[in-house]
Amino acid sequence: MSAVEDPRHISNGREIPSEGYADQPYVVRTDDGAWLCVMTTGTGREGAPGQHVVSMRSTDRGATWTDRADVEPADGPEASYAVLLKVPSGRVYCFYNHNTDRVTEVRTEDGGVFTRVDSLGHYVFRYSDDHGRTWSERRWDVPVREFACDRENVYGGELRFFWNVGRPLITGGAALLVLHKVGAMGAGFFAQSEGVILRSENIVTETDPERISFETLPDGDIGLRTPPGGGRVAEEQSLTVLSDGSLFCVYRTVDGWPACSYSRDGGHTWSTPEYLTYSPGGRRVKHPRAANFIWRLERGGFLYWFHNHGGCAARELPDWNPYDDRNPAWLMAAREIDGPEGKLLEFSQPEIALYDDDTWVRMSYPDLIEQDGRLFLTETQKHVGRVHELPAELVGGLLGQWERGEVARAGLALELADSVPGSVAMPALPPFTARDASRHDYGTKDLRAGFTVETWLRLESLDAGQVLLDSRADDGRGIALVTTERATVKLIMNDARGECRWDCDRGVLEPGTWQHLAAIVDGGPKIMSFVVDGALCDGGDERQFGWGCFAPHLRDVTGGPELRIGPAVEGLRIYTRALRTSEVVGNWRAGRA
């Protein structure tokens, strides 16, 4: 039995062994059929002495791990943030940071000192010719060309700062690796950063490490930075290749949105960086200072990992920490479209992929593994790395979101179309919690239930106080959809012990217009969200979040026996489960019955 009856809960993942600290559990499939995982680990916390790189293998899709090997020993210089590249011969290269010179502290741009020394020194590699069981006795340095940010650091470039989290790839016979250069240490640890590409034309075929060559791109001495007017932080670049050979790169900033850029010449030059949008020229994607990775799928299409919040509203909060709120993790699909200079990407509406009940827990640095038509994610909270299988229906819904146009039927408890009465019998909604008779203290059993309320409506005005739906009894118990002073619609949930509410984004409702509005209440991660006309609300310019958390102790919110329906509602469905975003988009595209 699962620890939690929800495959998205991180406790259901299979643990990847570590020494205590666990970072960047990245995986390649070896030619003997195993999964080879490389991880940065140690007995201390992130950045502590003894941090080093290990590898291990699994032949049962991450259920168990064997053949543990030190790529670098714990008693050597700090070795960190490894990535793997498998070439057609079956050889596997492991690239990572290495504090070869045993630097013990670094100066910051504001005159301070950091004793954390895991993001500097030499970029090196070892290789394995036995599918990761053992590694070459020697390591080799990768030559990295100096950029302006190196020359301008407090050491004048004599000591360089960098690290890597991006997955290498092979395209057009060349291998591409991503490196994140740091021009200044200071506020936020990395105070200035930018991305470069290391291109090797011969590593794919050359067996002599001494003869492997690397070129640092882009041309010139400035890497991939934020869009014009953006901040100083542009890091953790994630790279993928499109069907026409173009490269697409997406990366984190502290601006509230991730940045992206395209290269049409193998990485030598790049388009002016822009903030990532759902479609060219469309709404910006929100994301904090966290890894956001994109993967091209063998089956076609792309998946993108991010955290779905941020924007200018977040940056204006006095207590905002751009590293926080990496829970839940969201996925979007992407597909190629034609642009004036080559292929471009557009993105689906997002779905929650993984979550933890503790909202302070942070999960990040994922990797994606495909095998036998199944998809697996790795992730880490810095002390536990895990493997998770993605539900097929979640992935299929994301990839098929652009074509889906049928109405979801599973869990449909009420459907009204055409002539909608002023009231109907209220269907029973599943309770969120119950007493657990199996516990000695008869405490709470989290049922992780949910529901969805979906309407077709035409609001003649956005005046506050208009009741669209209301099942509330005299004691307040029940649900209601009501217009607000913000010119939005809010969902109210009340169990006679407490009340939770959340509203859609301002500006998405238009008076006198037919619109589709769905409120999703997901009792797994305890999240309320709105989808309006096929778009998941993200908070717009006014809120960091477009989705809100509700109280985990909420009980039954069905309310009274009657559901009162306002005149603006001319289509209604109520489901006794939380629909996926993709299902709501399909309902919207299917139109009114």
Image: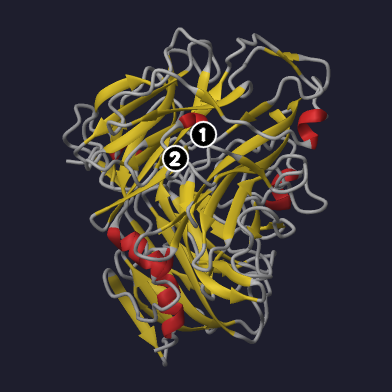
Report x, y in % for residue 565.
46, 78
| In the foreground, 329 or 341 | 341
Q: Residue at x 62, y 31 (%)?
A: 143
**Res. 149 visible in picture:** yes
Displayed quadrant of residue 338? bottom right
Amino acid identity at mark 2: Glu
102 vs 485: above or below = above
Q: Which residue is mark 2?
A: 206
The quadrant the C terminus occupies is bottom left
Residue 392 found in image quarter: bottom left
Separation of disc 1 and disc 2 at Cα?
7 Å
Q: Is residue 538 left or right of residue 587?
A: right
Circles 1 and 2 in contact, beta carbons < 8 Å: yes
Please provide percent x and percent y for residue 485.
69, 65
Q: Is residue 593 left or right of residue 46?
A: left
Instruction: Assign the N terminus to one quadrant of the image.
Output: top left
Of the image marks 1 and 2, the number of the one nearer the N terminus: 2
- The answer to which quarter of the image holds residue 16 is top left
Taking 434 as reference, is 560 left or right? Answer: right
Q: Is residue 471 visible?
A: no
The residue to which callout 1 is attached is 211
- Tell me residue 577's x, y (percent): 32, 62
Closer to the camera in the image, 540 or 447: 540
